[in-house]
Amino acid sequence: MRRRARTRRAATTAALLATAVTISLAAGCTSPDEGRNDGRSPDRTSEAAGPAPVLAVKIDNVRRAKPQTGLDAADIVYVEQVEGGLSRLMAVYATRLPETVGPVRSARESDLELLRQFDRPTLAFSGAQRKLLPLIDKAPVNAQPPGATDGAYYRGADRPSPHNLYLRPARLMPSVPGADALTTGFRYGAAPAGGRADTSETVRYPAAEFTFSWSAEQGRWLVSQDGAPTVQTDGRRVAPATVVVQYVTVRTSPYHDSLGNYTPYTETVGSGKAKVLRDGRAWDADWKRATPADGTAFTAPDGSPVTFAEGQVWVVYARAT
């Protein structure tokens, strides 16, 4: 079980806050450093003892942003609906930090609720709607837009702006946080009893589609988006060990983009239904997250925990019907 005791979280948070440097968030993006992105350097692997905050990165997920870099090193990838029925990713890093992650894009209001389950996480994002910036300033996160830390971001030359902003995680993280920082409430272990054979699942947003296909050879779910395989800049296929389709309330937020499209708000606190995919099988589950500071528990109808396979987890937020 990856969830730490609440008392340990409180002690860790106090220690971190005592030594943290307060980052003031500028109202909008500044020009990041220029550089080259190849994504080929080896990951840094966690060896250090002691918990530290996770790194959460908002990742562009439209066609012009692909292929992405550093996605396979994330412990968790959250998928959320944004304006125009499109999708955006939030990748959470705790056990590995790739040399490069991106393209990085802007934050949303619902990200702040989702991130409350972690102890003062570092949030890397390209900016936010102007009226949202004060909420990010007040949130218990280490906000890291371009310009907050020298050399953390650069623009790649392989695609046009705004789809070419990349992050160097090592500039923001003094060490790899480690698995103890993943205070998500997820349980890992042997497959639960029951379930049913399931080798393909598709989740549709108004303007985006995700398909997860089981590969018995790899022991992973191969990700496809909008009918095309999801691969990285190094050619590797993105393939999580566990996929969670979590059915949630998606409502309209007070914020909108420059075209007047209002931002969907994904409610991640509460309870509802879910589908957990692992090992080529599917389990129907109930999910519950009592407060923003809590992780999310997934249980079978009899109340027993639905355990995840070791490895990357994708959580896809789908509108409850």
Image: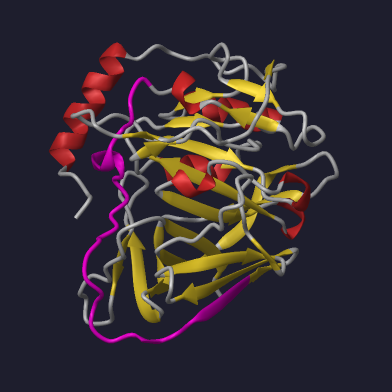
Residue 196 magenta-highlighted: yes
309 to the left or right of 98: left
Q: Is residue 32 magenta?
A: no
User: Which is the main secondary structure of the residues drawn in magenta?
Assistant: loop
- Closer-to-camera residue (233/272): 233
- Residue 247: tell me if it is visible: no
Q: Position of residue 289 (x, y in %)?
A: 34, 57
The relative height of residue 182 versus residue 318 in the rendered view (above or below) is above
User: Looking at this view, is 311 or 83 the one in front?
Assistant: 311
Please name whichever residue, 108 or 209, is drawn nearer the observer in this view of the structure. Answer: 209
Q: Where in the figure is residue 28, as x and y percent of width and height?
A: 69, 22
Position of 271 relative to 8 (above/below): below
Query: Which residue: 26% across, 68% down?
Result: 307
Image location of residue 43, percent across then percent down: 42, 35
Can you name the residue that lies furthest to the right here?
259
Image point 66% across, 22% down: which residue?
154
- Does residue 61 appear in this view? yes
Q: Quadrant of the N terminus?
A: bottom left
On screen, residue 102 versus residue 30, left or right, reads left
- Residue drawn 34% across and 15% down? 20
* Magenta-colored span: 174-203
How many numbered marks have been drawn onto this rendered protein structure? 0
User: On the rendered structure, is 189 left or right of 308?
Assistant: left
Reply above or below: 37 against 58.
above
Displayed quadrant of residue 85? bottom right
- Image quarter of residue 93: top left
Looking at the rendered image, the quarter that the C terminus falls into is bottom right
